[in-house]
């Protein structure tokens, strides 16, 4: 659905500049920006996807992944089309590369997001599947209503949002899982056609704004799996963010235009897990792996397993009122009052 966009300005002639994400696209008349969903029509910028939903489902919050945010709840999850990154290993390329004419689109209103959240028996809403930044106007309008109705909101994002829209969103956005795809500019330039620095800025600003953040790092053999790079990332997190921020190191599986690279060996992931702990990350996790205790939340004081995860089967018996059941140590986790 077409609607005039926010966060843009006029340039000479009939050109416009979009300021929603760090690309800052300068867009000529009748053209779209890099994301493919924001169009210059007659010298004004329009979002072509307001309320246009490509996918919706009730997902466990752990799927995002968010491990320290309302564990064992379900989020009404939805996405649209397009993306401001061009990652060659995209796992959702059928929607991220689709345009607003995508045939499976369903038009919905912000009010319906609240209705669906209730109907699907969810405790919150997740803007996910493709990049939510480029859906800003609809996410913001619907998140306001979702919060008012007493539900939580979260983004699964590449972190390329500009500061002003992030600040606008922050009063109605509870959590973000931010993908840090590498800790080198070169990777972002070659693989994502983007830059690392704006992503790191988003992490810092979101943290300052008190949005709950968790980071995901997909470990791709030969491209971003250098142990020095991982060490540098972990040091940066401890130094600039917070040692309590959960960091999910995920196993890569070949996809889209990157089928020539094998899956991440477990051995590499285990080394990374140890490095993260050595560098002071208190809650490193391994994702997309089928064995081991690397998905559990362990009390740093007494070693008790406070949350045990086996895929999406979540056991919260080791946690009471946000504290370790055994020693009473506070676990930095946002919980339902009942847990
Ligand atoms: S949101 Fe889209 S149009 Fe706007 S700057 Fe980013 S990529 Fe360009």
Image: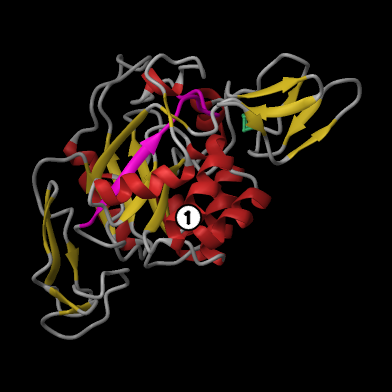
Q: Which residue is the extreme one toward the bottom?
A: 328
At x 44%, y 38%, the residue is 181
Q: Is residue 337 magenta?
A: no
Residue 294, can we see it?
A: yes
Q: Is residue 78 magenta?
A: yes
At x 17%, y 53%, the residue is 294
Question: Would you say the beta carbon of the disc 1 residue lies within 8 angstroms of ligand 1?
Answer: no
* Residues in magenta, as a range: 73-87
Query: Who is closer to the viewer here, 256 or 278?
Result: 256
At x 28%, y 41%, the residue is 250
Residue 212, can we see it?
A: no
Ligand 1, image quadrant it occupies = top right
Quadrant of the rendered image containing residue 220: top left
At x 57%, y 51%, the residue is 202
Would you place residue 196 above or below residue 319 in this image? above
Q: Quadrant of the N terminus?
A: top right
Q: Which residue is the extreme one toward the right?
A: 12
Would you place residue 159 above or below residue 293 in this image? above
Q: Quadrant of the C terminus?
A: bottom left
Q: Where does residue 102 sit, x and y in percent of width and height?
A: 44, 16
Q: Where does residue 21 sit, x and y in percent of width and height?
A: 63, 38
Assign a secondary structure to mark 1: helix
Q: Where does residue 107 sit, x and y in percent of width and height?
A: 45, 29
The residue tagged 1 is 145
């Amino acid at each position: 659905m077409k609607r005039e966009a926010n966060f843009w300005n006029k340039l000479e002639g009939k050109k416009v500049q979009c300021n929603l994400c760090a690309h800052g696209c300068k867009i000529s008349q009748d053209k779209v920006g890099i994301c493919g969903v924001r169009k210059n029509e007659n010298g004004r910028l329009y979002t072509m996807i307001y309320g246009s939903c490509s996918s919706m489902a009730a997902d466990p919050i752990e799927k995002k992944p968010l491990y320290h945010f309302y564990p064992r709840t379900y989020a009404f999850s939805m996405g649209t089309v397009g993306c401001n990154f061009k990652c060659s290993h995209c796992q959702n390329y059928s929607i991220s590369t689709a345009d607003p004419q995508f045939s499976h689109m369903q038009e919905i209103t912000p009010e319906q997001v609240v209705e669906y959240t209730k109907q699907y028996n969810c405790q919150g809403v997740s803007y996910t599947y493709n990049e939510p930044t480029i859906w800003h106007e609809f996410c913001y309008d619907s998140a306001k209503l979702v919060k008012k109705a007493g539900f939580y909101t979260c983004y699964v994002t590449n972190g390329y949002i500009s500061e002003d829209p992030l600040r606008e969103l922050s009063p109605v956005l509870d959590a973000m899982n931010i993908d840090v795809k590498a800790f080198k500019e070169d990777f972002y330039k070659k693989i994502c056609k983007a830059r690392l620095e704006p992503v790191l800025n988003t992490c810092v600003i979101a943290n300052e704004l008190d949005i709950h953040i968790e980071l995901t790092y997909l470990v791709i053999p030969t491209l971003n799996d250098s142990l020095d790079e991982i060490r540098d990332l972990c040091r940066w997190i401890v130094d600039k963010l917070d040692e309590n921020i959960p960091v999910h190191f995920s196993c890569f599986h070949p996809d889209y235009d990157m089928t020539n690279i094998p899956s991440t060996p477990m051995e590499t992931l285990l080394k990374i897990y140890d490095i993260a702990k050595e560098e002071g990350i208190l809650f490193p996790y391994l994702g997309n792996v089928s064995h081991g205790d690397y998905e559990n939340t362990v009390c740093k004081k007494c070693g008790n397993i406070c949350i045990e995860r086996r895929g999406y089967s979540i056991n919260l018996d080791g946690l009471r009122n946000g504290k370790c059941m055994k020693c009473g140590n506070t676990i930095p986790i946002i919980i339902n009052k009942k847990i």
